Image (spheres, grey):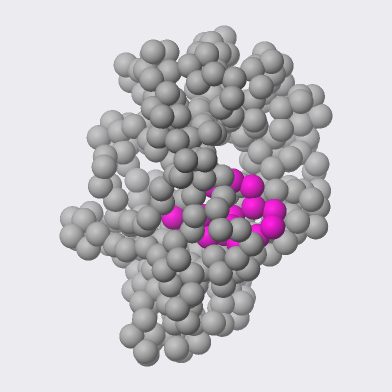
Amino acid sequence: MRVTEVVTTLHRVTRERPIRNGRYTYAHSGTVLTRVRTDDGIEGIGWAGGQPGADQTIFQAALALGEHAVDLDVFDVERLWERMFQPKLFGRRGLTNRAMAAIDIAMWDAMGKTVGVSVHKLLGGFAERVPTYLAGGYYLEGKGLDGLQDEMREKVAAGARYIKMKIGGAPMAEDVTRVQAVREAVGPDIEIMVDANNAYSPLEALRIARRIEDLDIYWFEEPVHAEDYEGLAKVRQGTNIPIATGENEYTRYGFRDLIACGGADILQPDANVLGGITEFRHIASLASAHNLPVAPHGSALLHVHLVAAVSNGLIVEHVVTEGSGRRSLIHGDLTLDADGMVSPPSAPGLGVTLDEDYLKETRIG
């Protein structure tokens, strides 16, 4: 059960068509893949993502940090995390935490495979099914209101009871019209989330919030800059739409500060970003102590285990984006049931597999 080797590789995929949110355009997708191998033949899989440039930094950090796992028992995740989290040496919050996440996640996958139990069960096994939402609604060249409406209808037809769309990347009046069009397309019984990806000032966020409040919005995600805690609190105080945020926050210490500002109704910790599953556990417990639900950002194959494991797990994000291509590096069984819910895989560990041929095609490091 001891780690004998940590192997990390870097992969990059070019999208068929670039997508855009309120602040960023994504033409490529980088993945840092880590494999933790043990003396009894187990291989755990972990990963983290980043855009070109950032992915190289995460990759190099993971190469260095992976050495800290060698000779540890796969169950020693707390010990490993403290070995890796050395703020003076590697930085307090940022891309290094993503590198830590890839290694930590691989340890948990290996741990589950060692004892023949899913990560969801290892972490507590609170629920067997959890709600999910289908995210999309990106800005795409040539995509008008009709295209947006068709996309959202397709998500509902696929079983979604919750859907998410982007705002903040168009003039405010246009975005209000886009939200109105989505509500018209899906009807009154489907929950709609809007995501600004930090695009607004507090004043702008309040203005658009007040213009869409009557459309029964489930949450308003990342309305302002991730570091603007004061502005976030002002937005929350000024609208009746629940505020969701946290996908760009790092470690339990960052979430401590986010909670203290009083700006969030729903926390969105991303285990691929904040330092891994080990740190996610601390954050979920911290959130629970403040009666806050957690709705992790991205990576449904990972986060379905974490949401289902804890009592304050709210919902899983499943991202289906245009222009991404159909092939994936990492595969897993994640199917919406008739109620729009998903279940964590029962296979040992995370229950994911790799497309080894595609990994070879996309490897750049």
Q: Name the image quarter holding residue 358.
A: bottom left
Residue at 75 percent across and 48 percent down: it is 292
Tell me where residue 168 appears, x and y as whole percent: 55, 23
Residue at 50 percent across and 87 percent down: it is 73
Q: From which residue to which does the magenta span run?
A: 301-316
* 33 with respect to 174 (left or right): left
Tell whether position 267 is magenta. Answer: no
Q: Nearer the viewer, residue 129 or 83?
A: 129
* 35 with respect to 207 (left or right): left
* 81 with respect to 207 (left or right): left
For residue 108, above or below residue 27? below
Tell whether position 302 is magenta. Answer: yes
Quadrant for the N terminus in the image: bottom left
Residue at 54 percent across and 18 percent down: it is 187
Q: Nearer the viewer, residue 112 or 158?
A: 158
* 94 with respect to 345 (left or right): right
For residue 124, above or below residue 200? below
Q: Name the image quarter holding residue 265.
A: top right
| Residue 93 in view (yes/no) | no
The number of discs equals: 0
Q: Name the image quarter holding residue 35.
A: bottom left
